[in-house]
Structure formats: structure tokens, C-alpha cells
């Protein structure tokens, strides 16, 4: 019961901070699972996906009420990340079962990404005016977004993070406003997590090691994330764009640094 209660609290605290910037929070749940709750690898990955499935509707319902899920961006992200997450799940089970390589890859990806986003926010180029809207030519094309979503889907399937924690910093760094990216990234994370969890369930029948999720912990954290995500989505329109961008970049750097330190120990 104590572990279940701790999972609810951790899930809520993480989601209320990450939902405003389009991150489900699963990426920050990973070190807690590995270091505090002792979830074995690779079972930590499907447990994270389970968290996304349970926690996601809270923020998405709020964004939908505000009309923030309209437009083609969410559709492009979902269509790209769904096949990618299946590929990533296969890679995770059969090629990257150990936590050391897992943590190192996250560090290598997120630290430069977060630093890049913070630098672009603090020292904007000629395509930014410091407002909530960027120049249209700064945004990636639809084809580029779809290709990026596929690649991030593979990474998300490996890490069990749904991909939103990578899509958010990249798309925001390329000129899209956080208010547009966050709902689409969370929608993509939710759908790909459903597909990824199903893929891991199938792979658990044939793959080596403990592949099934920790159902109790995943559900507990997810219930906390359901509440925290709703609150975070409600706060998002009230937060300035610059603060949201810096929060997203700082979260990415913090997580990548944490994983790098854990890998070097």
C-alpha cells in the first residue's frame, strides 16, 4: 500500500510539471522506477507505457475542452510514431535489454536537445520576435514532421516514453509555439503508448527476461498522472511562452544529466 501511495504522489507531481510543455512525465518516471521502486529492466519500459495510457486522458481531456487538439499536427505525429513504437519495442526486448546502454542513449539524446532549446529561447535568431507566434518559415514541413515522428516513435518504443519528451523540444526548437505542440505531442504519446504496451504484451510471450509491466506500480503512477496532467494542462494557457520553452529545455537537460551520472557510476 505504501508503494502504491508513493506511485500516485510521484505520478501527480511529475505530470503537473510536464503536461504544460507536452511531456507525459514518463521520461522522468524512469529514474524513479529504476532507482527507487526497483523495477527491473526491460520491464521498466512497458510500465512507463502503462503510465502514459492511464495518465494521458487527464491532460488530453482538458486540451480538447480548450480546442487545442484541432489541426493536422496531432494526426501527423500519431501516424508517424505508431509504426515506430512497434519497431522500438522489438529493439528494446531483443537488442537493448540492459539499463546501462539504455541510460547512456537517453543522456546523449536529451542533453544536447535541451541545451539547444534553451539557447534558442534565450538568444533568439532573426526568425523569432519573442512572442507566442514564430514566423511560418521557421516551422518544419509536414513531410519533415512525419519523418521525425517515425524516428522518435522508434526511440520512444525503446525508452517507453511515448516520444513526446523528444518531439516537444525538437518542434518547439524549430519554431512551433508550445501551445500548439504540447497537445499534439501528448496525443501522440497516448496513442503510441497504447500500441507500444500491446506490442510489449505480445513480445513478453516470446522475448527473454522480465518484459511484462509492473501493473500495480504503473496503474498507481498513472492515476496520479491523470490528476496531475489535467491540472498541468489547465495551467498551460496562463504561462508565458518563454517560460514554457525554458522549462522544456531544462527538463530535458536535467534528465539527460541524471542518466549520464548514473551510467558513469
Image (spheres, rainbow, N blue to C red):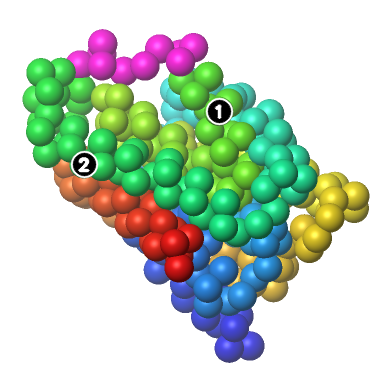
The residue under label 1 is 151
Identity of the residue drawn at 10% across and 18% down: 126
Residue 144 located left or right of residue 223:
left
Residue at x 46% of width, y 15% of height:
144
- Return the residue at label 2: 118
From this viewpoint, which residue is outermost toward the front?
A: 264
Q: What residue occupies the far bottom of the structure in this picture?
A: 2
Residue 42 is a magenta residue:
no
Q: Main secondary structure of the magenta part?
A: helix
Q: Residue at x 59, y 83 (%)?
A: 3
Kind of element beneath mark 2: helix
Quarter of the picture holding the C terminus: bottom left
Counting residues from the start of the chain, the first of labels 1 and 2 encountered is 2
Q: Provide residue 112's location: percent of width, then percent of height.
A: 32, 40
> For this rendering, which residue is in front, 229 or 112?
112
Place of residue 217 in the rendered image (x, y in percent of width and height, measured from the top left) = 64, 72
Magenta stretch bounds:
135-144
In this view, the residue in front, 25 or 105, is 105
**Where 104 sits versus 39, above or below?**
above
Amino acid at each position: 500500500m505504501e508503494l502504491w501511495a508513493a506511485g500516485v504522489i510521484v505520478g501527480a507531481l511529475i505530470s503537473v510539471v510536464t503536461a504544460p510543455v507536452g511531456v507525459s512525465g514518463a521520461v522522468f518516471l524512469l529514474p524513479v522506477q529504476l532507482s527507487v521502486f526497483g523495477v527491473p529492466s526491460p520491464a521498466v519500459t512497458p510500465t512507463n507505457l502503462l503510465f502514459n495510457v492511464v495518465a494521458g486522458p487527464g491532460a488530453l481531456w482538458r486540451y480538447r475542452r480548450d480546442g487545442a487538439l484541432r489541426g493536422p499536427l496531432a494526426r501527423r505525429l500519431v501516424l508517424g510514431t505508431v509504426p515506430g513504437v512497434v519497431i522500438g519495442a522489438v529493439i528494446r526486448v531483443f537488442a537493448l535489454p540492459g539499463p546501462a546502454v539504455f541510460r547512456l542513449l537517453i543522456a546523449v539524446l536529451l542533453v544536447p536537445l535541451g541545451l539547444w532549446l534553451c539557447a534558442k529561447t534565450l538568444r533568439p535568431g532573426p526568425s523569432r520576435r519573442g512572442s507566442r507566434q514564430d514566423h511560418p518559415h521557421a516551422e518544419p514541413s509536414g513531410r519533415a514532421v512525419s519523418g521525425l515522428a517515425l524516428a522518435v516513435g522508434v526511440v520512444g518504443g525503446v525508452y517507453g516514453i511515448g516520444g513526446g519528451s523528444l518531439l516537444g523540444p525538437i518542434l518547439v526548437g524549430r519554431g512551433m509555439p508550445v501551445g500548439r505542440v504540447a497537445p499534439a505531442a501528448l496525443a501522440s504519446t497516448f496513442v503510441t503508448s497504447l500500441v507500444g504496451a500491446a506490442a510489449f504484451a505480445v513480445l513478453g510471450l516470446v522475448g527473454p527476461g522480465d518484459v511484462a509491466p509492473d501493473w500495480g506500480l504503473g496503474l498507481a503512477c498513472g492515476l496520479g498522472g491523470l490528476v496531475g496532467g489535467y491540472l498541468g494542462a489547465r495551467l498551460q494557457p496562463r504561462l508565458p511562452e518563454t517560460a514554457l520553452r525554458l522549462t522544456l529545455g531544462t527538463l530535458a537537460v536535467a534528465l539527460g544529466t541524471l542518466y549520464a551520472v548514473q551510467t558513469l557510476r
